[in-house]
Image (cartoon, rainbow, N blue to C red):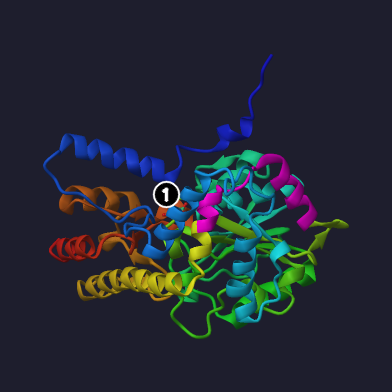
Amino acid sequence: MVTVNRNYLKLPGSYLFSTIGKKVNAYQSENPDKKIIRLGIGDVTQPLAPAIIESLHEGVEEMAHAETFHGYAPDLGYEFLRSAISRNDYQARGCDISEDEIFVSDGAKSDSGNIQEIFGIDNKVAVCDPVYPVYVDTNVMAGRSGEYNPGRENFDGIIYMPCREENGFLPEFPSEVPDLIYLCFPNNPTGSAITKDELQKWVDYANQNGSVIIYDAAYEAYISEENIPHSIYECDGAKTCAIELKSFSKNAGFTGVRLGYTVVPKALERDGVKLHSLWARRHGTKFNGAPYIVQKAGAAVYSEAGKAQLKEQVAYYMRNAKVIYEGLSEAGFSVSGGVNAPYIWLKTPDRMTSWEFFDYLLEKVNVVGTPGSGFGAHGEGYFRLTAFGTYENTVEAIERMKKM
Ligand code: MLT
């Protein structure tokens, strides 16, 4: 008799952004005349930069001729892309990460979900609360948690590290020492950032306790302040305790193109095994590489023209962040984030729950955001707005919210 992976049955409801999508679509079909502004999912709205489009076209043209055609990509990704990543994202920042420690993939969401596969099932997992749901859900699917506890609104067997306003939405060391620690900075969903000194404490903690940090740096391009690290490898000793996930979605608009990479340093060993060799084995067996044309487009991110164009694109979204932050502050909302990240985290007014505020905002002013409780129990009473909309829609959404 066929049995199923019953761990999936522990997951309540559907994926957060699928639930939101369904609710918004239902509202729109009942109210076809309403102009809904979507500031929910962190999906980009600006077209790919000209340097990237040019590179994509070149790649497509190459695929049209036998002499320049490309079949399967190399396991770790094309050397031209990995060397550009190593030089620009690491060596230029004084981080000694070599190109053979970089694994190119089809995006950070897949990698952040898949990375847990190389770890034993009995590892204790720690996450921030609120948290990007993929880290928790994929560990639940794998069987690394107990049941969902409806009273606490979280899973037994997972260590939750509350991120509260009073500590700048940063986690504290948990009372029980975890094996795997997921950290995301600049943070999704709160938009908070961690200083290099604070991150160094986590690196030291992980090295002292033999833990591994899975560091999601997807929003690194949005850092505007000086003392905020762009990579965990800026911290001493991170190569012996940390894996880093990076995305091309947020810095270069690849949400619909799909490209990312994961760094697994060769110095990172646990249980007598190099984690690099396990991830290489997994990558080689289960993945056939991001498409050539996409990797070629990814290399354009590091060209001089690409860098200049993407700086403008990031500035465009950060102007939206400012509009949201300042507009809502003026309107009396309590807001944070939006300085080193494209997310604004606000307190729901009048003690509304996150979902009550979601419905209120959708119905009253036709603006969509993301309920904080969708990211965890400590997100209750908060709400996330993304800066990835168009400028015009962002201004209009905030005008509508000011008049509520
Ligand atoms: C989000 O809105 O949290 C992100 O867009 C989700 C993602 O990047 O997968």
Nearer-the-camera pick, 98 or 192: 98
Q: Which residue is depicted at the point 25% across and 36% down?
A: 26
Q: Is residue 285 magenta?
A: yes
| 322 part of magenta stretch | no
Q: Is residue 129 above or below residue 65?
A: below
Residue 337 appears in the figure: no
Q: Which residues are magenta?
A: 276-296
The residue most toward the bottom is 226
The total number of labels drawn is 1
Q: Is residue 142 left or right of residue 272?
A: left
Q: Say which residue appears at 44% left-offset and 69% top-offset.
A: 306
The N terminus is located in which quarter? top right
Residue on which the image places disc 1: 256
The amino acid beneath tag 1 is Gly
Above or below 354: residue 147? above
Of the pair 295 and 193, the residue shown nearer to us: 295
Q: Is residue 347 left or right of residue 198?
A: left
